[in-house]
Image: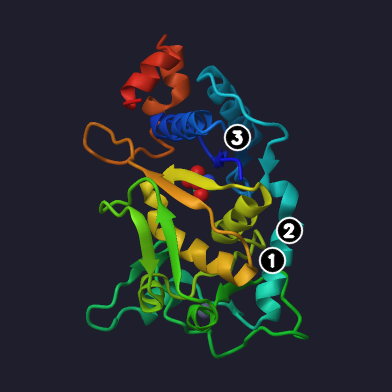
């Protein structure tokens, strides 16, 4: 299988130095392996995605000297594909609609079990309030405009023992074969959302579907997504999708040691470019 990796930005703001590092690293890895570098625009959140940010992504990456295969995959063009994956989980009886508001979840979590984590990769770990009120199944109609959650306990009872291969490092130096014991996944993630009300899909679902659709053999991305990988492994197993190798990379931080965010306009690639820096300067700044 030819080494295939991707850069998958969301067009919700300017790309910054952290994105430059991620894209350059993925591109370099593909080149070293004689492989492929693909681009994917993660624009399922249509309330935040903007065409001008998407255009800016192409500009910035081209300025950095990167080339990618066409056509670019835009997630908003593939919503039926995510609904089909969702329908499979629905028919397998692994989903349920959730009507909780954030406040309900906070209230339910206000008396947490001693020592149990309250935060997972998506924020608050859902206490399971709606789990018993309705469940999916073959012959049941999948609601269109509802939040759908994965019954993680039920899902993990279906998957085999899970692990993935880390060719980079996790935030705590994790590398090599990363085992994912079921009880650990359940405690760390809970019943995650697989379809948001306004999108009909979610980041986690779309990512695993598209990594498979694009034939990605190596996922190159920041350590901020290391904890999400366990969720992706569960979904791959449930959907019968191949598991890529993962390469999580260090994060580029600002002078205060804080991870860069989309709103850090000062670190935007375009700002450096306007100030007259070269792509080689940026490569140096991120340590490549
Ligand atoms: N779209 C995600 C982001 O911009 C990256 C997704 C991924 O690499 O899995 O943070
Ligand atoms: Zn609920």
Q: Marks 3/1: CA distance? A: 26 Å
Secondary structure under tag 2 reads helix
In the image, residue 194 sits, relative to residue 96, either above or below, namely: above
Give the numbered dot on residue 36: 3
Which x, y percent locates residue 159? 53, 77
Q: Earlier in the sequence, mark 3 or mark 1?
A: 3
Name of the residue lying farthest toward the bottom: 132
Location of the N terminus (image quadrant): top right
Which x, y percent locates residue 143? 72, 75
Secondary structure under tag 1 reads helix
Camera-nearest residue between 83 and 68: 68
Label 1 sits on residue: 85
Q: Are marks 2 and 1 in contact (CB under 8 Å)?
A: yes
Give the numbered dot on residue 201: none
Label 2 sits on residue: 81
Q: Marks 3/2: CA distance? A: 23 Å
């Amino acid at each position: 299988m030819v080494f295939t990796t991707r850069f998958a930005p969301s067009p919700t703001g300017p790309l910054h130095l952290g994105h430059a590092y991620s894209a350059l690293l993925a591109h370099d890895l593909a080149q070293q392996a004689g492989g492929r570098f693909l681009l994917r625009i993660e624009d399922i959140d249509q309330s935040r995605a903007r065409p001008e940010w998407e255009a800016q992504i192409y500009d910035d990456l081209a300025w950095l000297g990167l080339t990618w295969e066409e056509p670019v995959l835009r997630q908003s063009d593939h919503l039926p594909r995510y609904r089909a994956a969702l329908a499979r989980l629905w028919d397998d009886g692994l989903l349920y609609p959730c009507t909780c508001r954030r406040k309900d979840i906070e209230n339910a979590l206000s008396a947490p079990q001693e020592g149990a984590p309250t935060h997972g990769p998506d924020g608050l770990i859902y206490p399971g309030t709606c789990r018993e009120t309705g469940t999916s199944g073959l012959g049941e109609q999948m609601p269109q405009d509802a939040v759908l959650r994965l019954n993680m306990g039920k899902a993990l009872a279906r998957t085999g023992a899970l692990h993935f291969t880390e060719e980079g490092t996790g935030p705590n130096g994790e590398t090599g074969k990363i085992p994912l014991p079921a009880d650990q996944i359940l405690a760390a993630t809970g019943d995650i959302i697989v379809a948001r009300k306004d999108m009909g899909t979610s980041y986690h679902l779309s990512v695993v579907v598209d990594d498979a659709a694009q034939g990605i053999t190596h996922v190159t991305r920041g350590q901020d997504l290391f904890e999400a990988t366990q969720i992706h492994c569960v979904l791959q197993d449930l959907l019968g999708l191949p598991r890529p190798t993962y390469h999580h990379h260090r994060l580029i931080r600002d002078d205060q040691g804080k991870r860069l965010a989309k709103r850090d306009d000062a670190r935007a690639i375009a700002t450096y470019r306007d100030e007259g820096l070269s792509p080689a300067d940026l490569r140096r700044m991120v340590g490549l």
